[in-house]
Amino acid sequence: MNTSIINNYSRLKLFLFFPALFFLIAIALFLYSQDALCTVRYIQIQKDTFFFINHNLGQYPNFEYNLTQLGDALVFLPFLSIFILYAPKIWEAILSALLVSILFSCLLKKIFAVPRPAAIFNNNTFIIVGKTLCGHNSLPSGHSVIVFIILTVLLFAFMPKEFKFKILWIFLIITIGLILVSSRIGVGAHYPLDVIVGSIFGYISGLTGIFISQKYKIWTWIGNKKCYPIFILLFLICCISLINRIINENLIIFYFAFISLAVSLYKITTVYVQK
């Protein structure tokens, strides 16, 4: 599996960045045409769309709240933990991408300093699920960045060879991504453009992470069995963290993440002991 993924990554070209850059430029031009390059107008032109999406998705608060947890790396990554054994190249790309995304997200959040919906609108006029977020760090959506980093890495890792299957695979990944990131609007945490821009930067970060993992061998130790005790310890810490979340919030997504991580912990421990 790992060899197949390395081969898929080796075929990637820099032109894959072009669609993302095109959409970013298109969004910038749209905002400019609407005189919305300032915070007040940026929020104002999205107000109706935000309320519409929030109202409709907010009718399923438990479902949306579970979905939005996948924008948390601690919740999403356990589902991929088994790949440390069978496809460490995926983790090399993800870790590189996450480092790139930290630079993107922190820098852009400070530059734009867009207040969250709960900091602008009357909290009784829209649906808030979970903690009320009132900071001035709405753009871009960090959860959306993480979701699309992971999905982008998986997209190119398992890209089919036949054209028709490629189209279906791309469509499936994008659809899953949009469903997940739209939950940030459903829970009242972000505006529509926050999640769109976050998704685009997630794609850019994911693709950048793949290229970094191909060119630089900074994460090759991940596939080394001698390093498995590090992952065993990390898995145990994450299991404890997930148990704590289950106790505090009791969301079903935490149970699934915990089970995935527990299975991976068992497998990696077994492999290490039998080495």
Image (tube, rainbow, N blue to C red):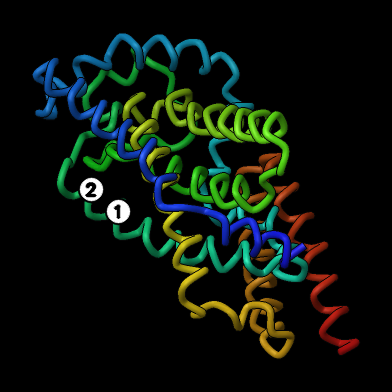
Q: Position of residue 41 (x, y in %)?
A: 13, 20
Along the line of sight, the residue nearer the viewer: 75 or 59: 75
Q: Position of residue 210 (x, y in %)?
A: 50, 60
- Numbered disc 2: secondary structure: helix
Q: Which residue is found at the position 65% from the left and 61% from the top?
A: 7
Along the line of sight, the residue nearer the viewer: 37 or 209: 209
Mark 1 neighbour density, 10 Å: few (under 14) some (14–19) many (20 or more): some
Name the residue type under label 2.
Leu
Q: Position of residue 214 (x, y in %)?
A: 52, 69
Q: Which residue is found at the position 66% from the left and 86% from the top?
A: 227
Mark 2 neighbour density, 10 Å: few (under 14) some (14–19) many (20 or more): some
Along the line of sight, the residue nearer the viewer: 255 or 108: 108
Check residue 108 in the rendering and tell me which mark sits there, or answer none. 2
116 versus 262 height, above or below = above
Q: Which residue is found at the position 39% from the left and 39% from the top?
A: 200
214 versus 204 height, above or below = below
- Numbered disc 1: secondary structure: helix
Along the line of sight, the residue nearer the viewer: 144 or 222: 222
Name the residue type under label 1.
Phe
Q: Quadrant of residue 122?
A: top left
- Which residue, given by chain and number where applicable, does mark 1 sit on? 104
Left or right: where does residue 267 sit relative to residue 11?
Answer: right
94 versus 30 height, above or below = below
Do the residues bearing badges 2 and 1 touch, measured as CB atoms within 8 Å?
yes
The quadrant of the picture occupied by the N terminus is bottom right
Q: Position of residue 44 (x, y in %)?
A: 19, 16
Distance between the alpha carbons at the discs numbered 2 and 1: 6 Å
Left or right: where does residue 68 sit relative to residue 223?
Answer: left
Q: Residue furthest right?
A: 274
